[in-house]
Amino acid sequence: MVEKIFTAIPSLVAGQIVQQNAVNKMVGQFYDANEDLVPAKRTVGIFVNEVHSEHPDWKTEKVFSEAGSRTRKALGLREKATTTKPASPAFVKQRGSRDRGGGEPQLEGLAKEIDDLITD
């Protein structure tokens, strides 16, 4: 019996390490996305435990999201606004002063024949 326990310990420890690494990665991602909450890590932890105890069926991402919202509400913080790259104004392209547009006019019929005789 004791031998079975001793042989099972390495696989249990390995499983715990994998699980702890996943949680650490998730926490890191949470604080990367919510930099304003880094100084309030203890408060966030309290709300994470509270939300998890109220909703044990929720996925961890949802628990963290709700805990972040509750922490901000309790501390009177606003969620950081996302910024987008401002679009450049759609100005009309300016043409040069010598550019009269369109190039040479297209000649047709008799005018084209006369132009061909003159330019050859």
Image: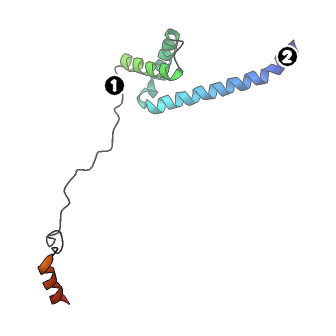
Point out which mark residue 4 bears: 2
Is residue 51 placed above or below 20 in the rendered structure? Answer: above
Seen from the viewer's position, the closer of residues 101 and 69 is 101
Q: Decide: few, some or many residues near mark 1? Use Cα within 10 Å; few <14, some 14-19, many ≥20.
A: few
Q: Quadrant of the N terminus?
A: top right
Q: Residue at x 62, y 29 (%)?
A: 21
Q: Residue at x 85, y 16 (%)?
A: 4
The kind of secondary structure element at disc 2 is helix
Seen from the viewer's position, the closer of residues 86 and 72 is 86
Q: Decide: few, some or many residues near mark 2? Use Cα within 10 Å; few <14, some 14-19, many ≥20.
A: few
Point out which mark residue 78 bears: 1
Residue type, label 2: Lys
Could you tell which of marks 2 and 1 lies nearer the N-terminus? 2
Q: Residue at x 28, y 47 (%)?
A: 87
Residue 82, percent across and down? Answer: 35, 35
Q: Residue at x 51, y 31 (%)?
A: 29
Seen from the viewer's position, the closer of residues 91 and 49 is 91
- Disc 2, disc 1: CB below 8 Å? no
Residue 100, percent across and down? Answer: 13, 70
Q: Quadrant of the C terminus?
A: bottom left
Is residue 53 placed above or below 33 in the rendered structure? Answer: above
The kind of secondary structure element at disc 1 is loop
Q: How many marks?
A: 2
Tell me the quarter of the picture where residue 93 sits: bottom left
Tell whether 75 sits left or right of 100: right
Q: CA distance from mark 2 to mark 1?
A: 53 Å
